[in-house]
Image (spheres, rainbow, N blue to C red):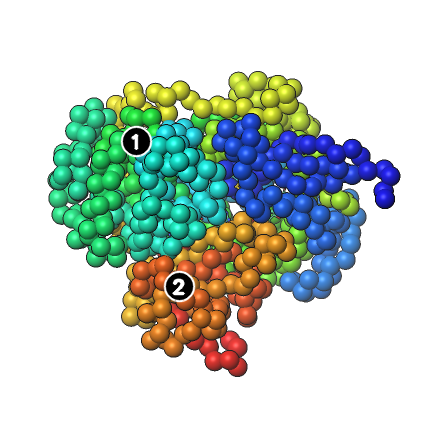
Amino acid sequence: MNQHVAPARTGHSACPHDCPSTCALEIDISGGRIGRVRGSSANTFTAGVVCAKVARYAERVNHPGRLTQPMRRVGGKGSGDFAPIAWDDALDLIAERFVTDEQGHGAEAIWPYYYAGTMGLVMRDGLNRLTHAKKYSRFFSSICVNPAWSGFLAGTGRLAGPDPREMAKADLVVIWGTNPVATQVNVMTHAIRARKERGAKIAVVDVYRSPSMEQADMPILIRPGTDGALAAAIMHVLFRDGMADRAYLASHADDAEGLEAHLSTRTPDWAATITGMPAEEIVAFAHAIGRTKRTFVRAGYGFTRSRNGAVNMHAVTCIPTVTGAWQYEGGGAFHTNGAIFGWRKTMIDGSDVLDTSVRQLDQSRIGAILDGEREALAGGPPVTAMLIQNTNPVTIAPDQTRVRRGFAREDLFVAVHEQFMTETAKMADLVLPATMFVEHDDIYQAGGNQYVILGPKLVEPPGECRSNHDVVTALAQRLGAEHPGFAMSPRAHIDWLLQASGRGTLAELEQAKFIDVQPDFDTAHYVKGFNWPDGKFRLKPNWPKVPYAAPSKMGPVADMPAFPDHWAVIEEATAAFPFRLVTSPARSFLNSSFTETPSSLNREKRPELMLHPEDAAPLGIACGDRVEVESPRGAVILHARIFEGVRRGVVVAESIWPNGAHEGGRGINTLTGADPVAPVGGAALHDNHVRIRRLDEAAVA
Ligand SMILES: Nc1nc2c(c(=O)[nH]1)N[C@H]1C(S)=C(S)[C@@H](COP(=O)(O)OP(=O)(O)OC[C@H]3O[C@@H](n4cnc5c(=O)[nH]c(N)nc54)[C@H](O)[C@@H]3O)O[C@H]1N2
Ligand SMILES: Nc1nc2c(c(=O)[nH]1)N[C@H]1C(S)=C(S)[C@@H](COP(=O)(O)OP(=O)(O)OC[C@H]3O[C@@H](n4cnc5c(=O)[nH]c(N)nc54)[C@H](O)[C@@H]3O)O[C@H]1N2
Ligand code: SF4
Ligand SMILES: [Mo]
C-alpha cells in the first residue's frame, strides 16, 4: 500500500475535445492521478452525461505511450528514430531555424499550424500571438466549420439560435446531418427528454443508418450531398399544402414570393430522383414539419462536408422560416453558438498586432502548400519551417498523398508538440511532449450550448510535459517577439479575457465553475428580426457577401444558386467511379484522438467499408473481404462489412483510423479532396466518388 496517497477529491473541469457538447466534468482524483470522469449534473446542458470515451479518460492521461520528453530526429524523415534532447536545446533549435529561414526567405516561410485538439482558448489560440507578433504566415482555419457556418450565416446573419436545451420542449426534433449518439451525446439527452415528457418525435436525416438513426422515430435516409434537394422539396410541399406561415414570411423574410415561384418545380418526385428517398416519404416528412409548430432542427456539420455544403445548410435553415417555427419555444434551427460569447481575445491571440498584409495559408490545403503549389502559397515563398500544436494533419487532412509528400521534404523543418507519437509527430524533426487538459489551466466555450467553463490544472503532468502556452512563451523570448500576452500566465490570461469581455473575473468563475450566457428568448429566436439591417431572413442570400472572414471568396462562388436548391457540384458517381463514399466519424474515436486508447480500439476493431448487399454481390464481395477503394486521388485498403442501412451506391467508412491501421499504410484521407468548398473554403470530406474491388487473399497493393 502506498501510504502517501493524497485523499480522494473531485476536480471540476470541461471536456477539452473538439466536440460541440463541451461537457462540464467532475473528475475523481487520488494519489495525484485522475480516476473516473463523470458529467456534471449541475450543468443543465451536460445534465450528468458524458460519452463513454471521456468517462474512461484515465486511460488516455495515464497511457504508457504518452510523450514525456523532447526528442530530436536521428534517423531519416518518418523513420521513427528519435533521441532525447533537453528542452532548452530543443527550443534553441526551433528558434535558430526560424531565424535562419526568416533571414533567407522572409518571415512568411514560417507557418505555425494548429487546430482544435484542445478547445481551451489559451492553449489553442495562443500560437496566433507568436504568428502575428513575428509576421509569420497566418493560419486560415477551414477544415471543419466553414461550409456549415457560412451556410447558417447566409440566412440568419448570426451564428446562434434557440437555446439548445429547448429541444426538450419541442414536439418534433429533427437531427439533421449529425450523429449525436457518437459525436455529441448530450443532444440525445435533450431530444429524448422531449420524447419522454411530451411524446415528441425524433427524425434523423443521414446517409446511413447511424447509431442516432437507429434511435429515430422517423429515419430519413438520403444520398450524400442531396440535403438541398430534400429541403427544397419539403418547402415545395409546405407552400403547396397550405403549411407555410405567410404572415411570418412577410414580416421576417426577404423574398417569399420569389422562393415559392422557384420551388414550383422542386417537387417530391424531383427530389426523390436526387436523394434516393421515395416521394411519399418526403411528403410525410414535410407534413410532420408543417403540422408541428415546435419543430426544432438541430443541424450538424456532417451534411455540410460536401462541395455544396454551405448551400445545403442554408436550405435547411430556410425550413423553419417558411413554417414560422422560429417564433415558438422549442422551435427554429440551431447549429452553433459562436456569436453569443463576445470575447475580446487580444491578449491570447495577439490580434492587436495582426498585420493584414501577411499572407494567409489554408489549413485544408496543407498538401498543396507543402508540395509548393504556387496558387496555394498565395504568391509567397515556400513554407520551410513549421511548429504544429493540437492537430495531426498527416492523418486527418484531405489529399493525403500530397500531405505526406510535403512532410517528407528534406528542406522542411517541422516541430510537433503532441501528447502522443502521432503520424504527424513521426514525420517531425523535433517532437515536444504536451500536457493534457487536467495538467494545465484553461477556459472553454461551448459550441453546441451556452456555457463558459473553467478547466483548472488538477494534477501534475508526467515527465517533462509542457503546455502549449509554455512553449509559445519560451519561443517568443528566444525570437524577440513582443506582446504583453507573452509575460502573462494562463490564469492571468483567463482573468484578462473574462474582464475585458464583461464576463466577471477568474475568481468568480472559480467559484461558479461555469457560467450560462444564453441570450434572452427574443434575441435567440430572432423575434424582432434576423441579423441584417432590414431584419429579414435571407431566403435569397448574397453568397459573395456572406459575412465570414476569409482571405478571399473560395470555390465556384459565382455559380451558387440564388435560392435553396440542389447544387450539382458534388463529386457525382460516374461509370469509372460508381460509388459515393462518406467518411463518418467512428463512435469511439474523436478525429484522430482516442485511436491510442485500448478500450476505443477494442470497440472499433478495424477499418471497414460498409456497403449494401446488392452492391456487394455483383462485385463478389462478402462480409470480411479485403477491398481496395479508389478515388481519383488514390487507393486505400479496408475490410468489407455488408450493411443494409444505406441507399444503393453509397458506401461508408467510419473514420479516422491511423493511416498505419490500413494495410499498405494509406489512410482514408488518401481518397478525399482538398479543393475548397464555396464560398469560404473547407474540406468536402464526405463527398467522394470511388470504385471498389475485392482483393484476392494473397494480393497486397
Ligand atoms: N465520436 C466522435 N465524436 C466526434 C468526432 C469524431 O470524430 N468522433 N469529431 C468531432 C468534431 S471535430 C466535429 S466537427 C463534430 C462533428 O459532428 P457532426 O456534426 O455529427 O458531423 P460529422 O461527424 O461530420 O457527420 C455527422 C453525420 O453526418 C452524416 N453525413 C455525411 N454526409 C451527409 C450528407 O450529405 N447528408 C446528411 N444528411 N448527412 C450526412 C454522416 O454520415 C454522419 O453520421 O463531432 C465531434 N465529435
Ligand atoms: N476523412 C475525414 N477526415 C476528417 C474528418 C472526417 O470526418 N473525415 N473530420 C475533420 C474534422 S471535423 C476535424 S476538426 C479534423 C480534426 O483533426 P485533428 O486536428 O487531428 O483532431 P484531434 O484528433 O481532435 O486533435 C489532434 C491532436 O491534438 C493533440 N492535443 C490535444 N490537446 C493538446 C494540447 O493541449 N497540446 C498539444 N500540443 N496537443 C494536443 C491530440 O493528442 C491529437 O493528436 O479532422 C478532419 N478530418
Ligand atoms: S460528448 Fe463531447 S464534450 Fe462531452 S465528454 Fe464526450 S467528447 Fe467531450
Ligand atoms: Mo471538426
Which residue occupies the foreground of this view, 579 or 421?
Answer: 579
- Residue beneath disc 1: 294
- Residue beneath disc 2: 643
Position of residue 404 measured from the top left corner of the image (x, y, whole percent): 55, 61
Q: Is mark 2 within 8 Å of ligand 1?
A: no
Which residue occupies the foreground of this view, 664 or 370?
Answer: 664
- The local crowd at label 2, few if under 14, some if 14 to 19, many if 20 or more residues have their Cα within 10 Å, is some
In the displayed structure, 662 sits above or below 369; it is below
Viewed as shown, does residue 253 lie left or right of 440?
Answer: left
Q: Residue at x 30, y 31 (%)?
A: 294
Position of residue 518 measured from the top left corner of the image (x, y, whole percent): 45, 24
Alpha carbon of mark 2 to alpha carbon of mark 1: how far?
A: 34 Å
Viewed as shown, does residue 688 lie left or right of 137?
Answer: left
- The local crowd at label 1, few if under 14, some if 14 to 19, many if 20 or more residues have their Cα within 10 Å, is many
SS at mark 1? loop
Which residue occupies the foreground of this view, 444 or 42?
Answer: 42
Q: Residue at x 79, y 48 (%)?
A: 86
Q: Residue at x 21, y 57 (%)?
A: 273
